[in-house]
Amino acid sequence: MHRLARRRGRRGGAAVVVAACALSTACAGRAAPLEVSVAFVNTWRVAGETLSAEDRAIVERTALDTLRRAFDGFAVRFEEGIERGSARIIRVEDTPYGRPMLLFGAAGVTYPAARVSSVRFDVLVNEELAAASCASLARCTRTRAEMLDGLGRGIGATGAHELGHQAGLGFARDAPCDDCYDSKSSATSAHFFGRKHWSDAALARMR
């Protein structure tokens, strides 16, 4: 994983953006951390129920905590909302209208050369309910608190994975391990209820 720094130069009249150094704390004294904005613009609907403000706060807090834990020891800073000057953006949103409304579509989307990622709230809701074998928050073998925490962890873990697909970073390569942030699948119990880590290959690229 690399932090972007600007080097003064001319190529078509624009400044050249280059990868300057690894995002480890060793670099923190030489350059500011990578700023990542996390925007929640989803509808907050879970199996026909609209989450309360209190429930939303739990999910948002857990998602941000998960992102920060994923990059503990690296010079990355996450803030909620769209911050002016942020180098990267993670948007938590529902699958856009006009796209196939599948129960299990892509949980995260990052287009080539993009610095903005989409985390699909509706897809993650369906995946978590399936992983817990629940029809809804009310009809579930897990407690409501467990499901809200799990949803927040799933959002955060997906955001961490998608950040690794953004332009100039490229440390998430879809590893074949369910408990890795860079796992190839989010449709697992570990994604919502386990404790994740980066694969050795991802860590090597991040450093």
Image (cartoon, rainbow, N blue to C red):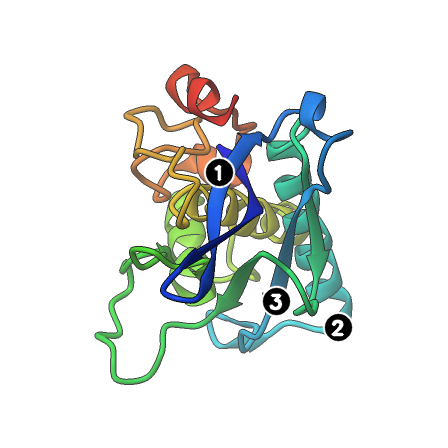
Residue flagged by tag 1: what amino acid is it? Answer: Ala
How many angstroms separate mark 1 from mark 3 (CA)?
25 Å
Is residue 87 rendered to the left or right of residue 185?
right
Neighbor class of circle 3 (other Cα within 10 Å; few <14, some 14-19, many 20+) is some
Report x, y in % for residue 78: 69, 50
Q: Mark 3 is on which residue type? A: Ala
Q: Is residue 66 above or below residue 179?
A: below
What residue sits right under mark 2 in the picture? Answer: 53
Residue at the spot of label 1: 19
Question: Could you tell me which residue is drawn at 53 percent across and 52 percent down?
Answer: 155
Distance between mark 1 and mark 2 Cα atoms: 40 Å
Q: Helix or strand or loop: what does disc 3 sit on?
A: strand
Residue 19, image x, y percentages: 48, 38
Q: What residue type is labelled 2?
A: Ala
Q: Are marks 1 and 3 in contact (CB under 8 Å)?
A: no
Find residue 133 and report its horizontal and vertical position in percent: 40, 47
